[in-house]
Image (tube, grey):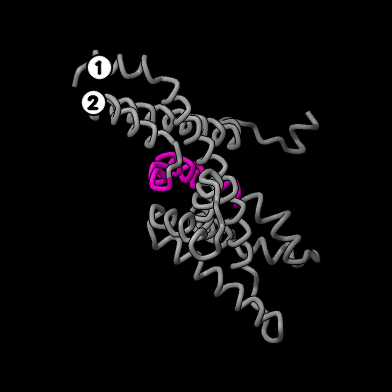
Amino acid sequence: MSLEWVIKIISENWPMFLRGAGLTLLIALIGTVIGAVIGLLAGVIRTIPMPERGAKKLLLNVINAILSIYIEFFRGTPMIVQAMVIYYGSALAFGIDMNVFAAAIIVVSINTGAYMAEIVRGGIVSIEKGQFEAAHAIGMTHVQTMWNVVLPQVIRNILPATGNQFVINIKDTSVLNVISVTELYFVTKSISGNNFRYFESFFVACMIYFVMTFIVTRILLYIEKKLDGADNYTMISNDTLQK
């Protein structure tokens, strides 16, 4: 590897690298947020208590079956294939001329939602049953129990997994080059095709990916630490207040 070529590539192409990195972060961020919302809704629905009989039971069974198919399909197929099917398939099957950026957001969001659905479901199941029983004992409905008691705990508990999914999405956006999304990998491929210095060009891209994921990871760790509160705190009791 030539250090001179690395410096030359950066100095001549830094605007392209910057645009590619910016688009990568944007797609990963939007896709993770939308995917987290999808996963939250799917996870909550999949943990609704099943009625013993009636139309509600039938409807819930149908919805759960659809969600199970969605989760298994998108967790069991590569994102690069999903991108091809959604972008080119929508044009062939339905005549939809989809914008590549919109297609990228849809692919990342749906893929993330499938993984987040299981993460959320696991988070809800991990909550002690006594909390559900206590909430129901004071007259809360299932929706009120989920909103006021369960979900605040679940969201905090799944924050590390959500952050990890965001980091994964930053790296996985590279597969979107197959539908011509001008993210970092696509830009680097174009630059290396112009200068024929493939190793140096992709070394720069590698360092940019590392810097992005490193910074994002540290920011998420900082947020988690803030949510946890201080490590050393004093419990305040009635005796303490009286003094």
Q: Quadrant of residue 9?
A: top left
Q: Left or right: where does residue 97 sit relative to residue 192?
A: right
Q: Report x, y in % for residue 172.
A: 40, 44
Residue 223 higher or lower than 33, as above or below: above
Residue 122 higher or lower than 155, as above or below: below
Amino acid bearing label 2:
Arg
**Circle number at residue 197:** 2
Q: Residue at x 38, y 47 (%)?
A: 178
Quote the CA–CA distance across marks 1 and 2: 8 Å
Q: Are marks 1 and 2 in contact (CB under 8 Å)?
A: yes
Q: Residue at x 66, y 81 (%)?
A: 57
Which residue lies most toward the bottom here?
53
**Circle number at residue 5:** 1
Q: Specify the segment rendered in magenta.
A: 154-179
Which residue lies most toward the left here?
1
Q: Which residue is drawn at 52% across and 50% down?
A: 103
